[in-house]
Image (tube, rainbow, N blue to C red):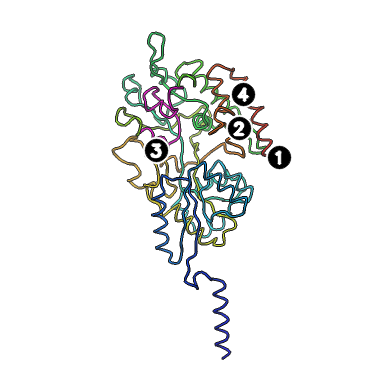
């Protein structure tokens, strides 16, 4: 009798600990995604996970990016975050400092197959978070590349960009690729404006720095200043790149694929846009950025997209298991637009990733860059001081545009950037 009573008590205890399973109900995980273009693929991942984990139900909420951040911030304020949710490099520090994302370090140390992930990308996230902790698991990354028009290079008799190209090699090529007729430029050798991916790519290729990590202040070093002057001189002195205002008839991402410029540096994700806009009308490819005079080629400018876990999830181990799945073995290549790089190495390093027969022929460059150390300029308030999204005409973006549009001098612009950006950063880092 005593044994039966003990078993009955044990059963009650187990039922209290595992109420959902013991009553034949499912354990529910909430997963929020910001990308409606891959909703079907996410549903397929969830179906695979549920099949491997009987008794688990994953409920997917998919929102457009702007709506996503409004609604998930409201949930954060209410302490009702979903168990697993997408996280941006641009907001990771804010969320990590506020304690809104779970520390994944113990889970990563315990059972992440580190050989199957680009650990340099995980380490980049640790640096971006600014807390010394792994607060997110990357599922994709992007980097920046040099796009170039092979038809224009061939016509001008210029050798294609190589890994040994210096900035002076780039400048000489841009001059040869710029075509002027009757005093009007018909074709530019290069195109850029104050956009973050257009500028920081060169800063980091010269081993430069915009933000002083010790003080969280805007303090570009000599290498960064050299890079920004090199860029603006391409417009103002060399005349091989246009002023921003000259390209107002284009979407910025269409200047290159529509044949108005022979070279362009921007995110690898624009491989997809180039294919859509240019089609087979031009032959183009990608190359590494020319290394600056102070560059060492050991790092690249790039950043991941992540999944994070709520610090208050009642199902922490299961949420981690799902996060690993949605960032790794559960994903397939059709989850990624051309130019986005899976952080799960078996997918990225598969022959299918190279998309043989499609442009760019040198897509394998992305695999090479994924293995390098990643550098960014993300801080609290980054979109405000950098000039991103709705604030594009402001911040550093607007200042560089004003320089190349001839509205201010380089030195005046740099002084303005120093004053304005540090006012913004002081509001965030008190």
Which numbered tag is attached to residue 385?
2
**Total label count?**
4
Residue shown at 39%/63% (left/top)?
51
Q: CA distance from mark 4 to mark 2?
A: 13 Å
Residue shown at 58%/25% (left/top)?
225
Q: Position of residue 43 (x, y in %)?
A: 41, 54
Locate the C terminus and report the quarter of the image it occupies.
top right
Q: CA distance from mark 3 to mark 4?
A: 34 Å
Q: Of label 3 and label 4, which has the lower sequence position?
A: 3
> Which picture quadrant has residue 378?
top right
Residue shown at 50%/36% (left/top)?
301
Residue under pointer 3: 365
Q: Nearer the viewer, mark 3 or mark 1?
A: 1
Residue under pointer 1: 430
Residue 254 falls within the magenta-colored stretch: yes
Q: Position of residue 373 (x, y in %)?
A: 50, 41
Find numbered disc 1 in the image and state the secondary structure of the residue it sits on. Answer: loop
Q: Of label 3 and label 1, which has the lower sequence position?
A: 3
Q: Position of residue 134 (x, y in %)?
A: 56, 51
Q: Residues within 10 Å of mark 4 (few under 14, many from 20)?
A: many
Find numbered disc 2 in the image and state the secondary structure of the residue it sits on. Answer: helix
Q: Of label 1 and label 4, which has the lower sequence position?
A: 4
Of all residues shown, which one is farthest toward the bottom?
1
Q: Nearer the viewer, mark 3 or mark 2?
A: 2
Which numbered tag is attached to residue 414?
4
Q: Is residue 223 at all visible to an observer of this figure?
A: no
Q: CA distance from mark 2 to mark 1?
A: 16 Å
Residue span colored magenta: 248-274
Q: Residues within 10 Å of mark 1 (few under 14, many from 20)?
A: few
Between 392 and 350, the one lying in front of the other is 392
Q: Of label 4 and label 2, which has the lower sequence position?
A: 2
């Amino acid at each position: 009798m005593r044994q039966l009573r003990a078993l009955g008590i044990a059963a009650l205890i187990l039922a209290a600990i595992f109420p959902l399973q013991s009553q034949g109900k499912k354990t529910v995980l909430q997963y929020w995604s910001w990308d409606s273009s891959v909703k079907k693929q996410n549903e397929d991942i969830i179906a695979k996970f549920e099949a491997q984990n009987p008794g688990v139900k994953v409920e997917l909420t998919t929102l457009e990016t702007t709506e996503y951040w409004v609604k998930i911030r409201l949930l954060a304020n209410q302490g009702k975050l979903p168990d697993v949710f997408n996280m941006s490099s641009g907001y990771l520090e804010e969320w990590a400092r506020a304690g809104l994302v779970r520390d994944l370090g113990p889970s990563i140390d315990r059972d992440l197959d580190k050989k199957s992930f680009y650990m340099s990308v995980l380490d980049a996230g640790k640096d971006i978070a600014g807390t010394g902790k792994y607060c997110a698991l990357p599922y994709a990354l992007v980097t920046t590349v040099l796009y170039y028009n092979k038809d224009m290079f061939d016509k001008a008799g210029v050798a294609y960009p190589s890994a040994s190209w210096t900035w002076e090699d780039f400048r000489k090529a841009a001059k040869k690729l710029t075509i002027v007729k009757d005093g009007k430029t018909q074709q530019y050798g290069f195109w850029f404006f104050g956009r973050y991916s257009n500028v920081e790519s060169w800063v980091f290729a010269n081993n430069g720095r915009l933000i002083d990590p010790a003080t969280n202040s805007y303090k570009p070093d000599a290498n960064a200043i050299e890079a920004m002057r090199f860029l603006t001189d391409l417009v103002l002195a060399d005349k091989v790149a246009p002023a921003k205002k000259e390209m107002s008839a284009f979407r910025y991402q269409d200047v290159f694929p529509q044949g108005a410029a022979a070279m362009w540096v921007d995110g690898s994700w624009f491989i997809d846009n180039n294919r859509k806009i240019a089609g087979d009308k031009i032959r183009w490819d990608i190359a590494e950025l020319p290394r600056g005079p102070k560059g060492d080629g050991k790092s690249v400018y790039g950043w991941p997209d992540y999944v994070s876990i709520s610090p208050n999830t009642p199902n922490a181990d299961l949420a981690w298991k799902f996060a690993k799945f949605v960032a790794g073995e559960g994903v397939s290549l059709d989850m990624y637009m051309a130019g986005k790089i899976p952080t799960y190495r078996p997918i990225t390093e598969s022959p299918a990733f190279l998309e043989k027969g499609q442009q760019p022929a040198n897509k394998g460059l992305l695999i090479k860059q994924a293995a390098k150390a990643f550098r960014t300029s993300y801080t609290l308030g980054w979109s405000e001081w950098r000039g991103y999204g709705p604030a594009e005409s402001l911040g550093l973006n607007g200042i560089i545009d004003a320089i190349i549009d001839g509205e201010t001098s380089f030195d005046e612009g740099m002084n303005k950037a120093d004053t304005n950006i540090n006012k913004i950063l002081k509001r965030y880092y008190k």
